Image (cartoon, coloured by chain):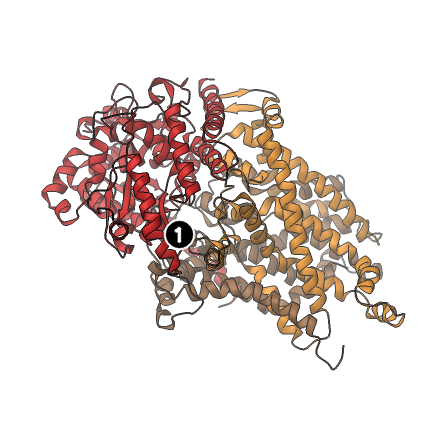
Chain colours: A orange, B brown, C red
Amino acid sequence: MERRTIFPGWGLPVLLVMPQLALTAVFFLWPAGQAIWSSMTRADPFGIRTTFVGLENFADLFSDPLYLDSAGRTVVFCAAVSAISLLLALALATAADREIRGRALYRFMLIWPYAVAPAISAVLWILLLHPQIGLVGHWLNRIGIVWDYKLNGTQAMLMVILASAWKQISYNFIFLLAGLQSIPKSIVEAARLDGAKGFFRFRTIILPLLMPTVFFLVIVNLVYAAFETFPTVLALTQGGPGKATETLVVKVYRDGVINLDVGSSSAQSVVLMAAVIVLTAVQFRFLGKRGGE
Amino acid sequence: MSGRADWPAHTVLALGVLLFLVPVWLLLAGSTLDPAAISRGELSMVPDLRNLGVYGTVLTEGAPGVGPVWRMMLVSAGMALAIAFGKIAISILSAYAVTFFRFPLRMVAFWIIFITLMLPVEVRIIPTYSVMSDLHLINTFPGLTIPLIASATATLLFRQTFLAIPDELVEAARMDGAGPWRFLKDILIPVSAANLAALFVILFVYGWNQYLWPLLVATDPSLDTIVIGIVKMIGTETQTEWNKVMAAAVLALLPPILVVVLMQRWFVKGLTEGDK
Amino acid sequence: MNRRTLLAGAAALAASPAIVHAQDTAKTKIVFWHAMTGANNDEINRIARDFNASQSEVDLQAIFKGSYADTLTAAIAAWRAGQAPHVVQIFEVGTGSMLAAGPAVKQVWQLAQETGAKIDPAAYIPAVRGYYSLPDGRMASMPLNSSTALMWYNKDAFEMAGLDPESPPDTWDKLVVAARALKEKWARPMAAKGGADVMPVTSSWFAWIQLEEFSAIHNLPFASLADGFGGLGAELKFNSPAHVKQLARLLDMSKEGTFKYTGRDNTPDPLFYAGQAAIGFGSSAGRGDIVRNAKFKWAPALVPYEPELTKTPNNTIIGGASLWTMTAPSRTPAEYKGVARFLEFIGQPEMDAKYHQSTGYVPVTLAGATLSEKQGYYVKNPGADMAVKSLTRGTITENSKGLRLGRLPEIRNIVYEEVEKALQGQQTAQAALDSAVTRGNRVLREFEKAVKA
């Protein structure tokens, strides 16, 4: 993970790293410190009266069954989003890696959705799945399948998972295709001559070579599902019905920005920060190892 | 696979293409329909070509509550470009510093950049807002962009690229007597051109799609981005003119898609090479 | 255009408003944050233009800040940063939080005292004034857009179902009977035709209309201590037998297919004007949308009552939002004076009547209502006075004045969550309301601790 060849002196590098460190300190470290402080206080929304309460907010959190439910739900949600978008992307990338006609066009048609804004993708899914005005939702009800994500928690969860996974397929496709293409054709060819066929060849030869990319994507997808999906969830279900689609970040957002319960929301943020740091450390170790290969 | 058509692959790919095309086609068709019909649930996949004028209307006049779409798109473009170039500049410098130099607290600096930048925006929005206000950056273009410029992803990506550069190349440059600056300018940047392009695409899309931060920090209507504009057009208390919302959404999709398309070759190549 | 010029162009564009505003420093600048979208946004801009044209000292700038919740959050963040707007529009359920904001706000009576502005509480409709006043009658915030709960019904559907379109059900028992008729003779044939998903009854704002308004109409406490007007120690009371019976009735209707829950807040609105729901409970402010969209004969009616609980149903309470004056370290007396002039301006009967007639919100002043009547508005628009009728029915009691509870939006959300679980068959009406009350009380105690500390 270290380069052998380096330039001497430390004045220049410090200067080079300064702009980034300054921005980080002002816009990240300081607010993060604020969040940690707030997590140990009880304050009214305006911050007029603030009392130090120690770890009370954390204690409340971990004794609240609704919070624990939300944590469990988040795990399911993240796993489902990552699995669906990775599997679909893998199928598409494997197909696009073949020597077929029109592959350039296919690739292009699968890459552009990367550019769709989450706010706009939420609009798209409403137009598709809304039980009354949505094209597919309306049709499902017409043919007698009761589709009502506003009241059916399972359907609501399915919908936010689909919408979130959909948005991530292109990203995964790009990386997986790149990963597939970097596998030397000679290895695949050799396996083919050895008589390894179809799925067996894929599982024993290609998949192991693709594992580094897959692992990287799993982490990226988990972080995406955990943090970046909240505008989508808010726009589609607002966390409901009941609490059926309330993930941890939706809860942080709701408690902090809508309910203005700064103390509890900050405590939840601190818990999430810890989770991100763990995930980041895993990713860092992994990437560091790969970089040194 | 040479010669005969690979039907399974074609089927999979075609289904994938449809998965993305159908919703966007719906948006396109919907933009040309009667807004009241959409509210009544009469959405259709067949566009009404007589109503294409809605695009001209939203571009030049906007919709109730928002200004003309061309202006909001210009703000979005400015924001996306400032974020993309700003991020690339500061990340390339810091990645260069942590990769090719040894200096005190180097790894501490790296970890600080790395961990804190993954804090989700909604976690730190209120404290960040007060920092911006102390710096008098509320309602300004720099206020819209600067807090989004620091980036762990970009630094990480460059670090990966730099780590992958063969030692021989670095040695050769040093034998030629290249100093740190010349090395950066003449060797590193050209070598990472593909990554630069890939990163530009990622960051442009990131900047273009921002929602929460612009909403909070820019209260002046002349700083409305197109994404904010679309959300403003979706009325909460009154009837939404869905056709205009959809037309604006289609227009909002075009620039980032165009960037992805135009830079597709570089984009994919950059990621491939960076991910060796 | 290359990238650099585009960037420079965008930056210049961004900088331009500062230059424009720098020129008229002679005027006192007042910033007004609001949450109005669509046509209502245009109406706010119209008011700002009219106000600016009506005098030469104050320049008011109206700025949209997102949804009601976004606006409240932004105002709080801005106040903490010393950058609060002069005036901000806060939804009615945020009133409790704003009243606890102490130094962050200047209440209307205080502003009037300091600036000598003439704002007379007696000019306002009692149900409106009550919601935004202190228990002793002093006004805390300035009413702007107010609405109330109504029952909109589709006259064509009534006719088809053999019901009298001129006498909508006024009690819940009659409503259940009507809904059954609608199901058999209207919804079933419509569904058979293969059209859109149709339902006899749906409700927007379930928490507000089916619980808060239900309490007010039947003079039942929603919370103790006069619905919270009596102090921060109020406890939720909406799990009484009467409330449970009402929710159980709606659950039964849902089961037999005569009522359909179609989402939180105002998301069910389009179902009524699209003709998919024969009866739609909703805000009176939805009138404009109904006028524009409904392709059938319709009318508003008062929300039904339960004769077993009361023979003399009370007024409904208001929804909507009011204007709050905010403070900032750098704020000058001239600025407060400017705010006072603006509040006086919108309180004039002519302005009130005009706003009422162009938005569908109720007139907030008695004079505004009289003026609208004199102008012949209600003759030309039958039923447009139904909201005022609803707000002025019976005599106002401590249970129908409004709610004064902190973090009420959060409590509404809890109600939605628990009711949605009950509608899915996961719990009974009793369990749903008990659980909502318990969770809601926890929120109230947190709020009490936070603002008392």
Task: Name the subunit of mark 1.
Answer: B
Indicate left or right for A115 with C85 as reference. right
Tell me how many marks there are: 1
Element on which disc 1 rests: loop
- Vertical placement of residue B74 versus A261, above or below: below
Q: Is residue C14 left or right of residue A231?
A: left
- Residue nearer the viewer, A166 or C151: C151
* Residue C38 visible in this rendered orientation of the protein: no
Q: Is residue C131 visible?
A: yes
* Residue farthest bottom in this picture: B3
Q: Position of residue A78 (x, y in %)?
A: 64, 46
Q: Quadrant of the N terminus of chain B?
A: bottom right
Residue B228 position (above or below residue C410): below
* Between B276 and C183, the one nearer to me in the picture: C183
Query: Residue C389 at what x, y percent from top left?
Result: 20, 35
Considering every residue shown, the one lying at the far left of the view is C374
Q: Amino acid at mark 1?
A: Ile
Please give the residue where the numbered disc 1 appears in the rendered image: B234
Return the x and y of residue A41 as percentages of the image width and height. Answer: 55, 23
Where, by quadrant of the figure, is residue A293 drawn?
A: bottom right
Question: Is A129 on the left-hand or right-hand side of C297?
Answer: right
- Residue C55, located in which quarter of the rendered image? top left
Residue at coordinates 26% horizontally, 45% vertically from top-left? C48
Residue A176 horizontal/vertical position (percent)? 71, 60
Q: Residues within 10 Å of mark 1 (few under 14, many from 20)?
A: many
Point 51% across, 34% down: residue: A256
If the image is split into quadrants, where does the C terminus of chain B sit? bottom right
User: From the viewer's perspective, is residue B233 above or below residue A234?
Assistant: below
